[in-house]
Image (tube, rainbow, N blue to C red):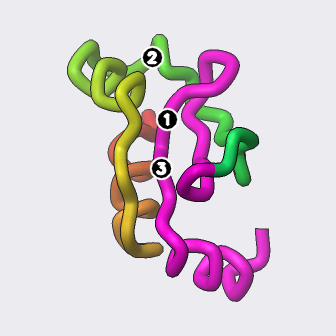
Amino acid sequence: MNKQILTYILLAGFILGVRGGKVALWRDQDPRPVQIYDIRVDSLPPADRLELGRGICVESREEVWQLLENYLP
C-alpha cells in the first residue's frame, strides 16, 4: 500500500484485529479490512491474541508500525 494513501487513511482512525486467522487493519467502522498482514494470530502470545480479538484502536501511522513490529517473529 502506498505510504501516502496509508497516511491519509490513518487520519480517519483504524482498528487492528483478526481476519481469517491473520492480523488485519480496518478503517474505523468499515466492515472490510484495508489490509491483511501475513502474521498468524495463533503464533502470538495469548495476551496479544485476546487484545487483537477485541480490536486495537490505532490513531497514528507510527502506532500501526510499532504494533506490527511487535507481532513479527
Tell whether position 13 is magenta: yes
SS for tag 3?
strand
Point 36% across, 52% down: residue:
57
Point 45% across, 40% down: residue:
72
Residue 63 vs residue 55, the one in the foreground = 55
Q: CA distance from mark 1 to mark 3?
A: 6 Å
The residue labelled by disc 3 is 15
Q: Measuring from the top left, give residue 44's x and y in whole percent.
A: 38, 21
Q: CA distance from mark 3 to mark 2?
A: 20 Å
SS for tag 1?
strand
Q: Which mark is residue 43?
A: 2
Side of 19 relative to 34 (left or right): left
Point 40% across, 36% down: residue:
55
Residue 19 versus residue 12 in the image, above or below: above
Q: Measuring from the top left, give residue 5's x and y in whole percent.
A: 73, 80
Side of 64 relative to 50 (left or right): right
The residue labelled by disc 1 is 17
Q: Measuring from the top left, give residue 26's x and y in whole percent.
A: 61, 49
Magenta stretch, residue numbers: 1-29
Q: Residues within 10 Å of mark 1 (few under 14, many from 20)?
A: many
> Answer yes or no: do the residues labelled 1 and 3 have beta carbons within 8 Å?
yes
Q: CA distance from mark 2 to mark 1?
A: 14 Å
SS for tag 2?
helix
> Answer yes or no: do the residues labelled 2 and 1 have beta carbons within 8 Å?
no
> Which of disc 2 and disc 3 is earlier in sequence?
3
